[in-house]
Structures are given as C-alpha cells and as structure tokens.
Amino acid sequence: MKLQEQFVKSVRLYFQEKGEAWLKELPNLIEFCEQNWSLKLQEPYSLSVNYVAPAVRNDGKEVVVKICIPGEGFLDELEALRLYKGKGMVRLIDFDQNYGILLLEKLSPGITLAKKIDCDEEACQIAAKVMQKLSTPAPAHTRIPTTKIREENLRNIIKRHPDGLGPISKKELKKALHIFTYLNETMQKPMLLHGDFHHYNILASGEEEWTAIDPKGLIGEVEYDLIQFMLNKLPDYGMKQLIAKRVEIFTNELNLNKERLLLWGYCHTVLATAWTVDGEEFEENFYQGISVFKQLFDVQYGKL
C-alpha cells in the first residue's frame, strides 16, 4: 500500500513508535472499514496525520472515512462532533471508538474556503456565519478540555525553555502566560469551540452554504476560537492592516469583546509560534502576528 510521503513523515514525527505501528496496521483498518460499513474507499485526500478518504457505500451513498490514531485527540473530536449534532459542523454518521474511526457525511462540492474565496473580507463574512451556526453553550459535563489546557501547554514550554524559545524572548513568553491565566480566570461565557477554526477547515457544502470540519474540541470563549483563522492566509505585506480588518469584521458580526479578542490574539499567537519552532526555523507569519496583536491592543487600550 503506497502512502503519501509527507503523511508518513508527519505520523512518524508526531507519534513516533505508536505512529509507525499504526501505519503498518492501516491496510487492515481500511479493510475493516470496507467490511464493517459495506463500502469501498477511494483515493485519499491530501493527508496530514489522519487517513481521510471518500468512500461509496453499497447503496450508492457517498461518505467520508476518517481513520485516526486512537487516543485523547480522537476522543475529543468524537465528542465535539456528537455535541454539535451537525449544527454548522459536518455530520457524524457512525464511529468505532476502539479503532479510532469516524464515518462522516460527504460535503459537496467540498472545496475549502481557502481555495474558493479570494476576497478576504468575503471569507471573513462566511467564517462569521459558520461560527454563528456553531454557537453552542459549553455542556455541564464533558471530557473536552478548556482553554486552560493551552495555558498549561505554554507553561510547560516555558519550563523547558526558561531563557526563551527560538525568536520568542523569555519576557514575551512570560507575558503571554500571564495574559492566558488572566483570560481563563475571568472567562464569562464558556462555549463549545471548534479548536482549530481556519480557512482549510471550512468547506463549501451547497449553494452558498458552508460547513466546518475537523474539530479539535475545546471549551472557552468564541474570541479565542477565531485567532487561528486570523493567522491563516496572510500576505507578505500589509499583515497588520489585514488582521485589523478581520478583527473588526468578527467583532461586529459576532458581537464580541474586542479587548479580549486582541488579548487572546496576542497570547495564542505566542503559543502558536512556539509550536512551530524547530531549531532555527519557525513560522515567520505567526511570529510577526505577535507584534501585530500587541500594536492593535496598544492603540485601543494602552500598552499591553
């Protein structure tokens, strides 16, 4: 079975021995899917660390099969899909918890927002409408973690890199952690969040209809859930102006707290940049985004 080269590299990088064992088991998992749900898998999509492919059932119905490495991430995604119940989110048809498999509806035409819409303002308006559909209060009891887990992630990064990480100074890391803590402690309206909301996780699902896919599952403020979107599809020049415009659109369309949006933007962008540091390499746009959110906050509310 020939697998996409980058997919294999990514699985080995992120999951190491567990990922290697899963890759060897993948042909058997595919066979299990075909037999269990009476379907035939087709060529997979462009893969990251999950095996995702369209499939046709014996009754002719098209679906999507997503095979994940079983674990916490899979369980969080499964619960998020069940809680959203298809409201702004791709519908869950069936699953196998032991093998980490999801059977999902197939969205048509299924083109990502990143590929279909060139106008950034229009893309933001569409994303805001999808976010409105996703709006779901946090359940009283759930396994899905809160944004406190992201704060802890940053805290652990600082413990491992007390003098700074890559281009991020010790002072910047500590400031971001302080703001993360403040925002988590003063959260007023926790919601069920997508957890990885951006242009490539929003698909065309009909005539002027759009639907989200691939939720990570998170509990927190909507303001936080929009930051990753604002860090995607950035230009080489004029980043500050573009992010400022995105902030205005989302704040107005979703009636958000702009101050908290900018604070979340700053501390999450520090974390997002830290995630990308590999030796001397890092995501330059994310790093520039740190100063952008800081400047936007300073202009509106005084020095961060």
Image (spheres, helix red, strand yellow):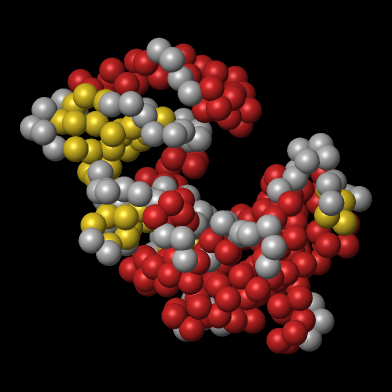
Q: Nearer the viewer, residue 146 or 125?
A: 125
Q: Is residue 35 left or right of residue 301?
A: left
Q: Residue at x 55, y 72 (%)?
A: 246
Is 114 rendered above or below residue 102? below
Is 226 rendered above or below residue 101? below
The residue at the far left in this view is 59
Q: Is residue 203 left or right of residue 218?
A: left
Q: Residue at x 27, y 62 (%)?
A: 209
Q: Looking at the image, how many numbered discs can be counted on the residues?
A: 0
Residue 191: x and y in percent read: 45, 68
- Quarter holding the C terminus? bottom right
Residue 193: x and y in percent read: 46, 62
- Quarter holding the N terminus? top left
Residue 55 visible in the snapshot: yes
Q: Residue at x 75, y 45 (%)?
A: 282
Q: Residue at x 23, y 61 (%)?
A: 207
The residue at the far right in this view is 163
Residue 222: x and y in percent read: 50, 70
Q: Is residue 227 left or right of residue 81?
A: right
Image quadrant in which you'd find residue 261: bottom right
Is 300 rendered above or below residue 191? below
Residue 216: x and y in percent read: 47, 50
Q: Nearer the viewer, residue 36 or 294?
A: 294
Q: Nearer the viewer, residue 245 or 212?
A: 245
Is 302 rendered above or below residue 59? below
Q: Is residue 54 left or right of residue 136?
A: left
Residue 179 visible in the snapshot: no
